[in-house]
Image (spheres, rainbow, N blue to C red):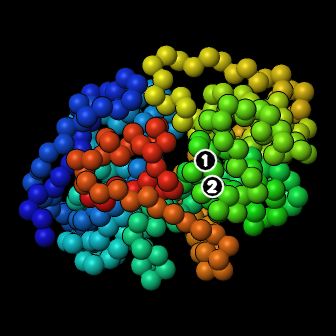
Amino acid sequence: MADNNRVARLAERPVGMVKADNFTISDEPLPEPGDGEFRVHVEYVSIDPAMRPWLNDVPSYIPAVQIGEVMRGLGSGVIEASNHPDFAVGDAVGGLFGVQTHAISNGKGVTKLDLSLAPLERWIGGLGMPGMTAYFGLLDVGRPKEGETVVVSAASGAVGSLVGQIAKIKGCRVVGIAGGAEKCKAVTDMGFDVCVDYKAGNLAEDLRAACPKGIDIYWENVGGEIGDTVFPQMNQFGRVVVCGLISMYNATKPPTGPINLGFILRSRLRVQGFIVFDYTDRYQEAIDDMGKWVADGKLVMREDVRDGGVDAFVDVLNLLYTGGNNGKLVLKT
């Protein structure tokens, strides 16, 4: 058992890309659980695009991380000390434990994990927030119908790769958008019908060729120029699921206003943003369905696990914004 807790705390708000100086990483005394609490040895931390906007002190669906606070992050680990009647030493658990090696919890928002079904890292990957996002965003917001064409941006990422596979399970034609031949191959290897390489310089033409019947559902992970290219090719009464806008997260100036309002009007598009935390009371539904799809060989989940511990947090986080990850990015503490 460790003698200290390795912790990443926000030291200053970043401008543009996150830098090492934005965080203080140090050893702190090992925290002890009080009455009704337990201590988790956090073995894996989920590295997510949302971490960057969480650092901006602006109104949002969740309060910004404050200066001096432990960096927010989902994690999975094993309980090593407990004064809680419902959580025992040795239980595998997942929750919002932060970027640190040990966390104290009163059990609120914590889920017990079944390691006979999947390893710890999978529970913050395909069976964690990315999986819940893909499942509910596509099925509840996108509402795919058999035979429709679904386009997914950031298709090789943690969420996009699952969205496309679930759309295939539902009988859709699925077109991914990714950067580079290697990532596009990974996307088609997961069962997408086509993957368009936006780095090739012909996105509009290549997308039109890949979607000869137009686009019924667009899963928006990126925003910016990619979204602007997709909108004109949407079919009437198409649906746009706004999951993320990763191209804008490190912007140092506010993005310009939307330029696609005309297409939204003329094509009667439904554009809806959603936050996965709105579906917490239904997570088991998604776990049951996706677990069966994995068992049946219909759904592939990939975690990109990086070593380096808490000290590597900033470098690993920035892989999301430079395209350096393949699959769900996870930091091993």
Using residue 138 as the reference point, say whether residue 221 is left or right of it: left
Tell me what residue is drawn at x 44 percent, y 53 percent: 329
Q: Is residue 246 visible?
A: yes
Label 2, secondary structure: give it. Answer: helix
- Dot label at residue 273: none
Indicate the quadrant where residue 154 lies.
Answer: top right
Marks 1 & 2, CB-CB < 8 Å contact? yes
Q: Where does residue 241 sit, x and y in percent of width and height?
A: 70, 43
Indicate the quadrant where residue 63 lies.
Answer: top left
Tell me what residue is drawn at x 74 percent, y 52 percent: 194
The amino acid on which the numbered mark 1 sits, given as a three-letter code, is Ala
Where is the C terminus found, in terms of image quarters?
bottom left
Pointer 2: what residue? 185
Tell me what residue is drawn at x 77 percent, y 32 percent: 204
Where is the N terminus found, in terms of image quarters?
bottom left
Using residue 180 as the reference point, say whether residue 35 is left or right of it: left
Pointer 1: what residue? 181
Using residue 284 as the reference point, say whether residue 141 is left or right of it: right
Q: Where does residue 104 sit, x and y in percent of width and height?
A: 24, 59
Using residue 204 as the reference point, say whether residue 52 is left or right of it: left
Q: Is residue 279 visible?
A: no
Q: How many marks?
A: 2
Q: Residues within 10 Å of mark 1 (few under 14, many from 20)?
A: some
Q: Where does residue 29 sit, x and y in percent of width and height?
A: 9, 54
Label 1, secondary structure: give it. Answer: helix
